[in-house]
Amino acid sequence: MKASATAWTHIRRSPYQAWAAILSMFLTFLVGGIFGLTSLSSFYILKYFESKPQVTVFFSEKAGETEAEKLNTALVETEKVSSTKFVSKDEALSIYKEQNKNDPLLLEMVTADILPASLEVSAKDPRYLKDLEPIMKNAEGVEEVVFQKDVVDTLLKWTDAIRMTGGIFGILLAINALLTVMTITAMKVALKKDEVEILKLIGASQWYIRFPFMLEGSIYGVIGSTTAFILIMGLLLWGRMALLSFVGMIPAIGVVIENPFSSAFILFSLAFYCILTVIGAFLGGIGSYVALIKYIKFK
Amino acid sequence: MIQFDHVTKKFGANTSALSDLTATIENGDFVFLIGPSGSGKSTFLRLILRDIIPSFGEVTIDDWALSKLPDSHIHLLRRKVGMVFQDFKLLPDRTIFENIALGLEILGKSKSEIEKRVMDVLELVHLSNKRNSFPQQLSAGELQRAAIARAIVGGPQILLADEPTGNLDPDTAWDIMQILDEIHSLGTTVIVATHNVGMVNHMKKRTITLKQGMLIQDEAKGKYHTTERAKHTKEKHD
């Protein structure tokens, strides 16, 4: 009998054990997959904010280009500024429209008047920002000074927390899945004790005896990870519009989730599926292998 | 060639299953191992199969010193050595064909090759009509023939049989011995552990007699009847 047929027979003959292993794998990959995607997204979000100007100076409603020009001159005189860019109310409206093009309701309610003009400033060295801060804050017509560093730092804290929580949960669930597969393999070996003994006596190689059990473990991993993948992708598609409004402006994310029929989305899905199933097959196979080392002795 | 060189096998500190046994079995021999229960016959066979290793001494098959054989090579030895067990050791959830085919599947043979070879050995053991039966549907004699078929299907150089007629009536036992003799005539070394003295005497083959783990007699042509059995009978009468 071929190894795959043997593995399938093992699964068919003990469905409850198979379900336990698959469920355990499913939960592991569901949580692992969600945290993995969140981590990946947060990485791109961070990158996006890091690539933005270091400081944005927002002007009050009545202030505009004149005030911005004065501030610009003051900043350039310090010789600590590498670049500045003035964003007028109209330009701010264009940017807003681009970011919210998928939500016509938001566009209807906004006009250029209610958006502030701003000056984007990048220092030659981030350490100069401290010196530049009083100049910007005390300048005429300035309403708010937003340091990108603060945003990045906050994001960094969040992403670190997400990674840490996800990592711990992922590892715990992976250990749980591994132990479940090991226990189930041990039970299967006990059930097949006579068969294993006969196979050993008639000259079956270690690989010939072990492989169907390992394949069985891998099948649990692949089924568990595939079902988790389907659910995660379902959730992603379901919440796509909401996600687009939050993080759609980030190119790496927006281009993927904007259109579920785009090649970017299909490639991303394939890569994600391959990663999950390869890890699933490996986790299931290794769980079985560890149990086999312990419970089937060749000597 | 199978060589036992001063082999001692102990189970625990005080139980010696074999003591300082030296014997040689040439390729193509047919050897009966006889002796009372606990004399070490099964231990002798298990040592050849490398199911156990000697406490002292060495068992050698051709160039392989079995106690030094790596675990990863044991299966290669067992492909050279077929074993027939008294309790048959057939898998109950597989047909007779599938049970026998197992011996070829482990060798990675093709489906057509398996089909042909299994049918050949089923014919040899007169079980062609039982290929699709399950073990529980067969008589003890048929089961033993199926077990022999599985042991020889891979073409082993050596065939070991541990009490192959232990559970069988005399006629069926005789059939089994005839089959073993036929296998021997094809060039296989056959070693049979048995209590069936009548059979041993009738077959007139080399007979190794064990008692309390020691080799007490090694006769070329089944002289057990004229020497050991007479001695046993005499001891009994005395």
Image (cartoon, coloured by chain):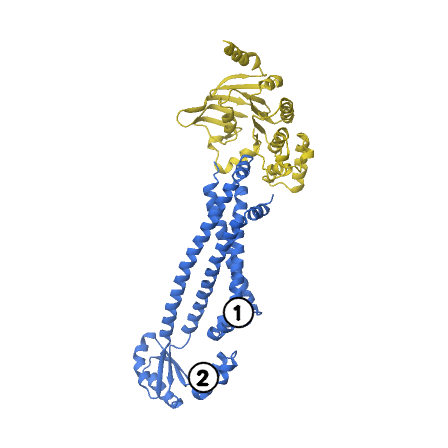
Chain colours: A blue, B yellow
Question: Residue B45, labelled with which disc?
Answer: none
Q: CA distance from mark 1 to mark 2?
A: 30 Å
**Quarter of the figure that contains the N terminus of chain A:** top right
Q: B131 or B20, which is in the foreground?
A: B131
The correct choice, above or below, for B83 with respect to A246 in the image is above
Residue sitting farthest toward the right: B129
Residue B230, can we see it?
A: yes
Q: B22 or B15, which is in the foreground?
A: B15
Q: Residues within 10 Å of mark 1 (few under 14, many from 20)?
A: few
- The image quadrant of residue B221 is top right
| Amino acid type of the residue tagged 2 in the rendering | Ala
Asked which secondary structure carries label 2, the reply is helix
Q: Which residue was labeled with disc 2?
A: A92
In percent of width and height, residue A89 lies at 44, 87
Residue at 52% from the left image edge and 50% from the top image edge: A16
Q: Which residue was labeled with disc 1?
A: A238
Q: Is residue A159 left or right of residue B118?
A: left
Name the N-terminal-most of marks 1 and 2.
Answer: 2
